[in-house]
């Protein structure tokens, strides 16, 4: 088996996840270099990935100025920091595993697509839902013709109220001016998965949504700017940062994100709660992204979809796919799909494992994190994989999200062809 050499740019949670999976699959990959500006993260990953000092960098510039010495680059920087290293890596002839979104700026998405095509390299965007057993099973049911002709889909992304508070109120993706819109950052996964399941182009979109709850108007009386300063509502508040980040010793995601350390002490976390947005009252942060949004979509062949993203939920995506021959309903994380055949009038439970007999991956995003790493290896080796998508497909599906946000802001139906022009 041929080992592929990869460079990693960005040592945050996504970069750590992808590089660690690649490192553990050493028969397929060799992680040969890392660029990460935060010292603690850089040193932690250097040790975890067994990298020499000469192959660890504070920034990506010197790494990409070197003559090409690997097969591919993983780019897992923040949203607005994708474009420059992506273009530099493409120029060197590297294949890319690029964290989503490609870019918050539509023109940059097209420029990356064009550069990759011109150079003849692959850019695989991290739409990890495609690689989960759940959505692969749904794709298999559709492709086998069990539903007949697809007519309509109802799809929900219940973000989870505390997840919303962590990532999209207090966290890195709270403000669209610093990162990207909610529909692009969180739900470009879903725009991509709808197009993949349907296999048709989206024609037009209509969207509504707003930031309704996580704002100062809803702050309880007497609440301080920072939870740790003593809030009279601390005991009953589900968003109390002290309880979520400091008292809960088992929530590594929250503790490492807030402290920017992979081995945080209580002192590290407390320092973050006193000095960063992670410690602020959830109603007094810099956030401006929506906490609920709906999108109506019309695809070719008169196929309609409704998509709903809402913070106020327990989490776990849900979907109902309705066709002329039957319907199927599922919740991500559950072992079965509920299928009804209109001709036989019979309903049955379909085990996801029975549809994905060749997929034993488990892990983050319902198996999608591991799944995309293994699919990336297939791509680099020239092998087919049902979930793989060309960068042009990813760009087109990003455009659905861009157009949906324009519809929400301008209050009108947006034609995809018009938006592209």
Image: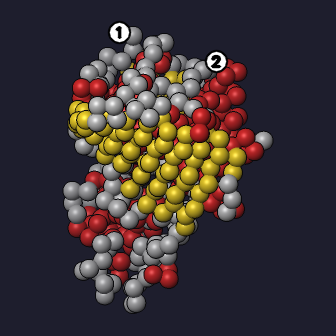
Q: Quadrant of residue 3?
A: top left
State the count of labels.
2
Q: SS of the residue at dot 1?
A: loop
| Quadrant for the C terminus in the image | top right
Residue 246 higher or lower than 104, as above or below: below
Residue bearing mark 2: 120
Report whether residue 409 is seen. Answer: yes
Residue bearing mark 1: 1
| Name of the residue lying farthest toward the bottom | 222
**Drawn side of residue 7 relative to residue 257, left or right:** right
Q: Where is residue 169 in the image (x, y as percent from the top left)?
A: 46, 65
Residue 38 higher or lower than 68, as above or below: below
Report whether residue 62 is seen. Answer: no
Give the numbered dot on residue 282.
Answer: none
Q: Quadrant of residue 132?
A: top left
| Quadrant for the N terminus in the image | top left
Q: In which quarter of the image is residue 117?
A: top right
Residue visible at 29% across and 25% down in the picture:
356
| Name of the residue lying farthest toward the top | 1
Residue visible at 32% across and 16% down in the picture:
27
Q: SS of the residue at dot 2?
A: loop
């Amino acid at each position: 088996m041929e080992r592929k050499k990869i460079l990693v740019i960005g040592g945050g949670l996504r970069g750590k996840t992808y590089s660690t999976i690649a490192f553990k699959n050493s028969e397929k990959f060799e992680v040969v270099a890392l660029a990460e500006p935060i010292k603690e993260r850089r040193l932690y990953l250097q040790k975890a990935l067994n990298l020499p000092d000469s192959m660890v960098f504070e920034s990506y510039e010197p790494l990409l100025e070197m003559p090409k010495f690997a097969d591919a680059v993983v780019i897992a920087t923040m949203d607005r920091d994708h474009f420059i290293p992506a273009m530099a890596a493409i120029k060197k002839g590297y294949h890319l595993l690029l964290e989503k979104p490609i870019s918050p700026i539509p023109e940059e998405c097209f420029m990356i697509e064009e550069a990759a095509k011109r150079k003849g390299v692959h850019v695989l965007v991290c739409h990890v839902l495609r690689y989960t057993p759940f959505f692969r099973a749904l794709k298999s049911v559709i492709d086998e013709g069990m539903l007949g002709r697809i007519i309509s889909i109802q799809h929900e992304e219940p973000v989870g109220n505390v997840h919303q508070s962590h990532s999209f109120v207090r966290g890195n993706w709270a403000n669209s001016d610093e990162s990207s819109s909610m529909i692009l950052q969180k739900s470009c996964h879903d725009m991509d998965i709808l197009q993949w399941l349907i296999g048709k182009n989206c024609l037009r979109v209509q969207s509504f949504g707003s930031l309704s709850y996580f704002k100062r108007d809803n702050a309880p009386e007497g609440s301080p700017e920072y939870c740790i300063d003593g809030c009279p509502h601390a005991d009953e508040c589900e968003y109390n940062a002290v309880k979520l980040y400091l008292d809960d010793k088992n929530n590594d995601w929250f503790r490492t994100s807030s402290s920017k350390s992979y081995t945080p002490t209580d002192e590290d976390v407390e320092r973050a709660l006193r000095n960063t947005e992670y410690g602020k009252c959830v109603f007094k942060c810099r956030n401006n992204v929506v906490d609920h949004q709906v999108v109506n979509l019309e695809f070719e062949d008169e196929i309609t979809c409704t998509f709903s993203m809402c913070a106020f939920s327990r989490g776990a995506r849900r979907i109902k796919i309705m066709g002329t021959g039957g319907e199927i309903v599922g919740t991500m994380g559950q072992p079965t799909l509920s299928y009804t055949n209109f001709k036989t009038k019979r309903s049955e439970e379909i085990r996801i494992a029975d549809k994905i007999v060749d997929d034993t991956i488990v892990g983050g995003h319902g198996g999608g994190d591991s799944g995309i790493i293994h699919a990336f290896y297939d791509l680099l080796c020239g092998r087919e994989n049902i979930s793989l998508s060309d960068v042009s497909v990813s760009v087109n599906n990003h455009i659905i999200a861009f157009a949906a946000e324009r519809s929400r802001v301008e209050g009108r139906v947006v034609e995809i062809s018009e938006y592209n022009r």
